[in-house]
Amino acid sequence: MPLDQRYVVAAFNAEEDRLAFVSATLEWVQSARKAAVFQSQMDANYFIKKNSLAESTAAQTPELSGFDHVRPVYVRVEIKITSPEYDPDNPDRGISFSGMG
């Protein structure tokens, strides 16, 4: 999957403050780098529905203080070869997320 325009799933409070991202293993993480990345908003919405993440009673949501809703977030994913973390043998270490909305 080439990196470019993607979606991650994020939890928000009622004021639309982002609380956390969800990983592929359904754990809430603070970094978008650790989040599950989807090719389309439709794929992200399916992941939310399949795992009942939109429901505040879902097993994963009680650990989030102030949780109100979950939605896909558009991101631009780039490999930054100038990043100090960049490793040509492991390009995921140089990933940068920007344009989260």
Image (cartoon, rainbow, N blue to C red):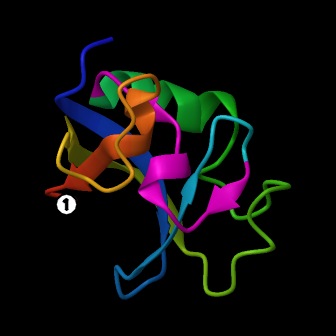
Q: Where residue 83 sits in the image (x, y, percent)? A: 25, 53
Location of the N terminus (image quadrant): top left
Q: Is residue 30 above or below residue 43?
A: below
Q: Is residue 82 left or right of residue 9?
A: left
At 38% across and 82% down in the image, what residue appears? 17
Given residues 94 and 18, the one toward you in this image is 94
At 18% across and 56% down in the image, what residue appears? 98
Which residue bears the numbered disc 1?
A: 101
Which image quarter: residue 52?
Answer: top right
Given residues 90 and 36, the one toward you in this image is 90
Q: Where residue 55 sits in the image (x, y, percent)? A: 67, 55
Which image quarter: residue 41?
Answer: top left
Q: Estimate how packed mark 1 is, as few (under 14), some (14 to 19) or many (20 or more) residues with alpha carbons within 10 Å.
A: few
Given residues 42 and 34, the one toward you in this image is 34
Q: Is residue 87 above or below residue 53?
A: above
Q: Where residue 87 sits in the image (x, y, percent)? A: 39, 35
Q: Report the span colored magenta.
A: 27-40
Total labels drawn = 1
Q: Is residue 53 left or right of residue 99?
A: right
Q: Is residue 63 magenta?
A: no
Secondary structure, mark 1, is: loop
Q: Is residue 80 left or right of residue 29?
A: left
Label 1 amino acid? Gly
